[in-house]
């Protein structure tokens, strides 16, 4: 039964609220391991859901599910040591909501019904908001409210978009289930005007949760204030869940012959997001906010590639997978930096190469990967997107895309060099590093980066075919 993969963390999440700290930590890792096993079994066997009117195993959902499961398992191992080192109050609440967050995100990946997907994405907001408020500060309260309010407005617009799509069925006199699979098959009989209106609302609605500009304003605050394990999930996984809602709707648009319309809008929003990230990352003085703006950039890259279509859509899917792996690694490393230096500001860090060498390797490797250095997968994905843009005659947009990536790299590199090599003491010889680099606080990052590297040189046939199956539905592929 497919549903068990999201019911398991839901049940253990409720139980975790009432358990002592030590048991709750073990339950977090245990649930992550069970979830990973169940996800691999679903990947291997491709079973049919018990409630097949609402849930289905789709190629794009499978990709996100496997990424979610692997990331959560590694993040949960890191979280045990992180909780011991940090000063998190009500640890059982944090653990419980981490598991509920896993449950809701898993539900998103398996949702096929248009309204069930909407409910699942809204549930991710409710499950993740308490994680942002973990430190109980005024700044975290502000970030939490901004996250809830902005995303709630966005999700309301997505609901309107879903209603407009159902209206396109009524006008077209189409009798079909409200599932993405069914709507894709009957897309040519749907009313095109209401489909266009519905897509715009859904793009703005789910794009708010995805972090596309100009709806991205909640993201830097939320990622900055949340504990690093939660930030890793928010950036590495949650943004992908919102993208799934847009991707599935874009499949309907493409099947209805409206791919050029939806693609153009995706290209515009993608470029806006990349340009917004380039503007803010140059003068960023907090390293977690810097990583948050990098996430906005990467979501823009994914939207841009999806909108271009063809080989660029394949590149977008590659970027989605590798961004999740690398950005999660970076946020976990940022947790070590915060615990070690006790400061969120870049000027309060320095000389990480000698003072925290294990974290430095992970952080610098993550920087190289997320910046698009070969041989990391982001480089491969971006090359496919650029080639796809030139193939389809998007010369101006491709130029803006490349220029923005160069600006972002320059700003990112400048700040990473300060963290890694600047003088730490800066006139105060009494400053010391407060964190001992335990193995469990660095090797999850190494595994994530190593996974990204391995996938660049060896991609299993099943994974490759799943990506091709996903992007073919929107006219993508390697041809």
Image (tube, grey):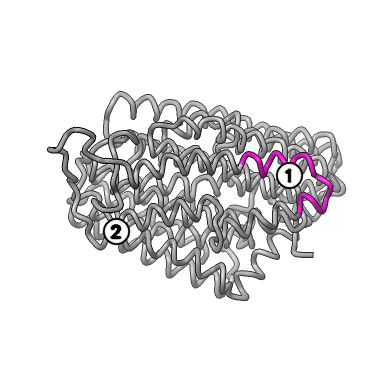
Q: Position of residue 350 (x, y in %)?
A: 29, 42
Which residues make up the magenta segment?
A: 388-404
- Establish if 33 lies above or below 272: below
Neighbours of disc 2 within 10 Å: few (<14), some (14-19), many (20+): some
Q: Quadrant location of residue 258?
A: top right
Between the C-alphas of marks 2 and 1, the distance is: 37 Å
At x 27%, y 36%, the residue is 343
At x 43%, y 57%, the residue is 365
Dots 2, 1 in contact, CB < 8 A: no
Q: Position of residue 407 (x, y in %)?
A: 58, 38
- Establish if 94 lies above or below 30: above
Q: Number of callouts in the render?
A: 2
Q: Secondary structure at mark 1?
A: helix
Q: Quadrant location of residue 285?
A: top left
Taking the image as shown, residue 420 lies to the left or right of residue 399, namely left
Q: Which mark is residue 358?
A: 2
Q: Quadrant of the C terminus?
A: bottom right
State yes or no: residue 393 in magenta. Answer: yes
State yes or no: residue 457 in magenta. Answer: no
Q: Position of residue 29 (x, y in %)?
A: 30, 61
Q: Which mark is residue 398?
A: 1
Q: Secondary structure at mark 2?
A: helix
Neighbours of disc 1 within 10 Å: few (<14), some (14-19), many (20+): some
At x 49%, y 70%, the residue is 40
- Most prominent secondary structure in the magenta stretch? helix
Q: Which mark is residue 450?
A: none
Taking the image as shown, residue 108 lies to the left or right of residue 330, namely right
User: Disc 2 or 1, which lies upstream in sequence?
Assistant: 2
Tell me if residue 202 can be seen.
Answer: no
């Amino acid at each position: 039964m497919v549903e068990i993969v999201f019911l398991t963390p839901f049940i253990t999440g409720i139980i975790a609220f009432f358990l002592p700290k030590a048991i709750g930590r073990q339950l977090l890792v245990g649930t992550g391991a069970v979830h990973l096993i169940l996800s691999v079994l679903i990947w291997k066997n491709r079973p049919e859901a018990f409630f097949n009117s609402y849930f289905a195993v789709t190629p794009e959902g499978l990709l996100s599910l496997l990424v979610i499961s692997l990331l959560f398992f590694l993040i949960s191992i890191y979280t045990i040591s992180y909780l011991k080192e940090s000063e998190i109050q009500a640890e059982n609440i944090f653990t419980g909501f981490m598991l509920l967050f896993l449950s809701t995100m898993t539900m998103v990946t398996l949702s096929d019904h248009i309204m069930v997907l909407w409910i699942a994405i809204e549930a991710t907001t409710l499950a993740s908001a308490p994680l942002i408020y973990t430190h109980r500060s005024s700044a975290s309260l502000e970030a939490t409210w901004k996250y809830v309010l902005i995303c709630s407005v966005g999700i309301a617009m997505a609901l309107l978009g879903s209603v407009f799509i159902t209206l396109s069925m009524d006008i077209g006199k189409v009798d079909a289930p409200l599932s993405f699979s069914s709507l894709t098959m009957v897309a040519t009989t749907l009313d095109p005007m209401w489909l266009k209106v519905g897509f715009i609302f859904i793009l703005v609605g789910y794009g708010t949760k995805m972090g596309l500009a100009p709806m991205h304003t909640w993201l830097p605050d939320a990622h900055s204030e949340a504990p690093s394990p939660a930030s890793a999930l928010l950036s590495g996984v949650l943004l992908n869940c919102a993208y799934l809602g847009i991707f599935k709707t874009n499949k309907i648009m493409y099947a209805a012959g409206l791919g050029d319309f939806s693609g153009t809008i995706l290209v515009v929003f993608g470029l806006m997001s990349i340009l917004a990230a380039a503007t803010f990352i140059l003068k960023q003085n907090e390293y977690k906010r810097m990583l948050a703006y990098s996430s906005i950039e990467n979501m823009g890259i994914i939207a841009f590639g999806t909108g271009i279509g063809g080989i660029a859509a394949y590149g977008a899917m590659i970027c989605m997978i590798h961004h999740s792996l690398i950005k999660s690694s970076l946020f976990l490393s940022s947790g070590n930096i915060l615990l070690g230096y006790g400061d969120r500001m870049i000027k309060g860090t320095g000389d990480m190469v000698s003072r925290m060498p294990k974290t430095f390797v992970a952080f610098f490797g993550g920087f190289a990967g997320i910046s698009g250095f070969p041989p990391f997968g982001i480089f491969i994905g971006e090359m496919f997107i650029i080639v796809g843009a030139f193939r389809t005659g998007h010369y101006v947009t491709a130029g803006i895309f490349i220029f923005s990536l160069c600006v972002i790299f320059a700003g990112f590199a400048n700040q990473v060099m300060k963290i890694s090599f600047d003088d730490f003491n800066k006139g105060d010889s009494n400053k010391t590093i407060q964190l001992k680099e335990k193995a469990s606080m660095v090797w999850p990052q190494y595994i994530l980066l190593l996974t990204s590297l391995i996938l660049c040189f060896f991609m299993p046939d099943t994974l490759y075919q799943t990506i091709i199956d996903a992007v073919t539905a929107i006219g993508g592929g390697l041809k």
